[in-house]
Image (spheres, rainbow, N blue to C red):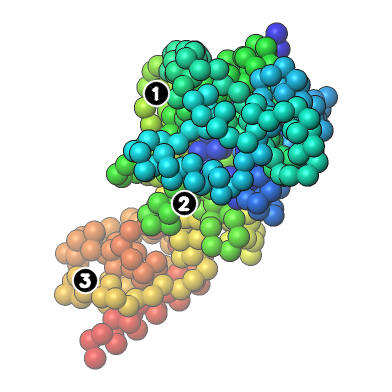
Amino acid sequence: MTTRVRFAPSPTGPLHIGGLRTALFNYLFAKKNNGVFILRVEDTDQHRYVEGSEEYIQKALEWCHLVPDEGPVSGGDFGPYRQSERKQIYQKHIELLVERGKAYYAFDSNEALDQARKDADGQGNTFRYGASNRMNFRNSLTLEAEETKNLLGKEPFVIRLKVEPNKEVVAQDDIRGTIRVESNNIDDKILMKSDGMPTYHFANVVDDHLMQISCVIRGEEWLPSLPLHQLIYDAFGWETPQFMHLPLILKPKGKGKLSKRDGEKEGFPVFPLQWGEGLVGFKERGFLPEALINYLALLGWNPGNDQELFSLEALENTIDLSGVQKGGARFDFEKAKWINHQYLQNSTEQQLLETEEGSKLLDHFDTETAVKIIALIKDRLYLLEDLKTETQLFYQEPDYAHGVWDKLLQKQPLKILGQLDHIIADGLDGNALKEACFAWSKENEIPFGVLMQSFRIAIVGKLAGPDLLTICEILGKSVTLKRIEKAKLSIINLNL
């Protein structure tokens, strides 16, 4: 049997990284088993539909190299791949369940149902529309066949699953084992809404069967729905696929799953790409897609060893979902940045120069110089957005404000910079410049470290940064001398 898996998001907003991880595990499972990865858009809830969401989902998957083999864009033999375009299919299958006595029409008004809920609450009970009380309601089980037929064209109705009482519903999840639930605890769930659209549960099962899905890999939040889905499969007499429910991605701190609000509060993204004006994604923060995928694979999955860096191809060959943990996986943005740092270090200077950030920031340098700059700062990059901070010293004069000279004012920085003026003006650079500085500092009994600190502040405006002599080589003699002159003036002004 061919392995066929699906990622089935609802287009109700941007794709959360929890959803992206679900897509990733489906994709990897398909590739590991030479199978098919399907994108299905579950858009039956038209009230929650958000314009642009479907396009966002497709773009996010493509950016992460998780391109669907079948879907609304890719096409395929099992379409349509949007549930809103499959209405006739659902109608045919719901009629089949009604004919078999596995589902029934319900004509109950909202007022009647509200009153029933109030009555149950008043008695301290939880209201369920099911075997214990369905004969008290207005449905095709309590009405004559002719009356039901007449009402179908005149009054709104829903179609409910007929759950047999006093049965044990047994479902299997490959991560969590056997799930057992008493049927008396399951409502006669609505399968078809009054607007003629199927509920998630009904459409989900029908589509998975018709699309020949062999394994359903989805988030833990759907685990409580598994017994209901088992009942729908049983009602049709269909074989159930494998099920795997992935653990939740948890907040960095405290309880509960990771949310958009957590990202806004802590200053990290929770979406792969930017959504609207305010919600910046991992891409815009400077993550490489390979690094994000690597990090998400480790959220809830253990390879069985200490390896932490996996290319997408390596994951395709390595992934074994028996290594998926049951408990939630806590999101750690610093760990995600560390993994991105490793990928940036393994990128060539040319690759980083060709990124959107690199090409924009260094486009006014010739290619050879731009490559030198990236080689100099590459080991300081954790995000591509760091390129702006690390490269600005090459096109922006330093700012000597904020007390940058305070610790050096009593250590003759003006004398040091005056001598540096002469040494650099003489054309010395590289090792020759360093040796000349060292000799002068020794002769004048000025610590070499103090000399280099004064030199660094003059050129970059702070004490930290990449190799100073390489910076001077890239800046060139005239720019270096100009910055030393500006530094000298800033010290003179402080002493006035």
- Location of residue 35 with respect to 479 vertically, above or below: above
Picture disc at residue 263:
none
Is the Cβ of the residue at disc 3 closer than 8 Å to that at disc 1? Answer: no
Pointer 2: what residue?
260
Q: State the image coordinates of residue 471 (x, y, percent, origin top left).
A: 45, 59
Q: Name the residue rendered at 66%, 20% in the picture.
A: 102
Tell me if mark 3 has few (under 14), some (14-19) or many (20+) residues whose alpha carbon lies within 10 angstroms of its own.
some
The amino acid on which the numbered mark 1 sits, given as a three-letter code, is Lys
Pointer 1: what residue?
326
Label 2 vs 3, first from the N-terminus: 2
Q: State the image coordinates of residue 354 (x, y, percent, origin top left).
A: 64, 49
Tell me if mark 1 has few (under 14), some (14-19) or many (20+) residues whose alpha carbon lies within 10 angstroms of its own.
some
Answer yes or no: is residue 309 visible: no
The amino acid on which the numbered mark 3 sits, given as a three-letter code, is Leu
Location of the C terminus (image quadrant): bottom left
Answer yes or no: is residue 181 visible: yes
